[in-house]
Image: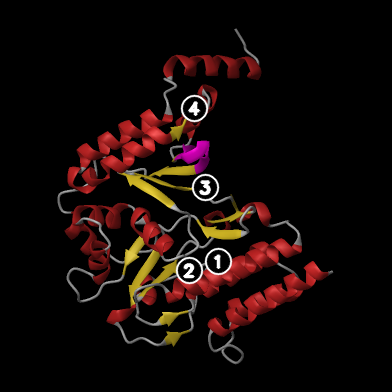
Amino acid sequence: MHLSPGHLRVVLILALLQELQVRPQGDILRDQFEKDLLLCPACFAGQREQCQAIFEAIAEPSSWSRLLKAISQLFDQRQIYWLELREKKDRRTPLVAKRKALNPYTLQVNNLKEEFLQREERPGGFHLCRTREEPPRFVTYLKERGHCFPSIWFYLTYDVSPLLLRELHSLDFPVPRPYGSCGLTHFQAHAGRTLTHYAEKEEAVRLELARQVLELSLKLTFGFADFRLYLTDLTADNLAYDEATGKVTLIDVDSLVLVDAASSMGHAQKYEPLPGEGFTFDVSMLCSGQQLDANVYQACLLLRDFLRPNDTLELLLDQCVRCPDDQCDMRFQVAYDLIKLLEETRRGLEIE
């Protein structure tokens, strides 16, 4: 018997209905947390009370929406849930729950400290530049901020986001508000649509987005508590814009290099990109101790190739990316000049 594509889709859905149990997402997340506790009790035991409160406050979507999510995960293994949290006075807050996809059979939780400290310098993910301090000063900083050592070593090794997002938000960096971590699942506020949706927006909007992206690049470079942050994945998909608040937010902080500036006497230095398209980098270069303008380079590259505010600014952004020695000592001053020009141009458009 031959079935049309439409009939095949119906048969597929009916088969999935037989196989999939449409469960409340709160129950799914609760069960995942219990499994994480078995994986590393010392890492996550202190999260239980906070996590129970989150699970109970989740406002469940319709059964149909939950079914569609279950079906989608058969083809897309990324575990991202868009939820609503019931708060006071019937207020509902949009949340995003992100679960790190790790293989529990290959995880090593008995020697987390040694595994992290012996990790080789390599691109991708999170990298903490090595210093002579034992433990590294960033670990001591996190301990003083209230994290336990097993949790610190686990998240540094497998997913730095729960640690770093909390610190950056408390210091007014443009990142989503964190609502808590439950084992391998992290809850954060929904921050709007990614910048990929704004490439063709009106010029005034693109000018404002460009200004905030450049400001973000400077803020990360200057960092906090003598720690510098160099993003290695500054893309339009990694930035979100909330039209209600008018703010650009960095929604993922798991791909970066963190430098302990207190352990070095490095001076400011211009970043020289490696051959290749996009942002190409050498971890050892970012860990050299110098205050590099690598974040500004990435911001200018993104804005030039993606947002393209207008012809004049596109030319200036190209000069920022290339930064020829005879015209450009460092990109920091270029960034300040661009921020000022972007604001003035946007205001001029509003007056018109």
Cα separation between marks 1 and 2: 7 Å
The answer to whether 260 appears left or right of 86 in the picture is: left
Q: Residues within 10 Å of mark 4 (few under 14, many from 20)?
A: some
Amino acid type assigned to the residue bearing label 1 in the image: Glu
Q: What numbered label is drawn on residue 190?
A: 3
Gap in Å between the C-alphas at discs 1 and 4?
Answer: 40 Å
Residue nearest the observer in this picture, 213 or 14:
213
User: Dominant secondary structure of the magenta stretch?
Assistant: strand
Looking at the rendered structure, the secondary structure element under dot 3 is loop
> As displayed, is residue 295 above or below residue 69?
below
| Location of residue 256 in the rendering, given as x and y in whole percent from the top left corner | 40, 64
Q: What kind of element bears circle 2?
A: loop
Quadrant (top left/top right/bottom left/bottom right) for the C terminus:
bottom right
Determine which of the numbered discs, if any, sits on residue 280 in the image.
Answer: 2
Q: Residue at x 68, y 74 (%)?
A: 343
Q: CA distance from mark 2 to mark 3?
A: 30 Å
Residue at the far right in the pictured view: 352
Image spot of residue 63 (x, y percent): 51, 22
Residue at point 28% right, 62% down?
Answer: 145
Q: Secondary structure at mark 1?
A: loop
Depicted 163 relative to depicted 214: above or below: above
- Residue at image point 43% right, 70% down: 230
The residue that mark 1 highlights is: 277
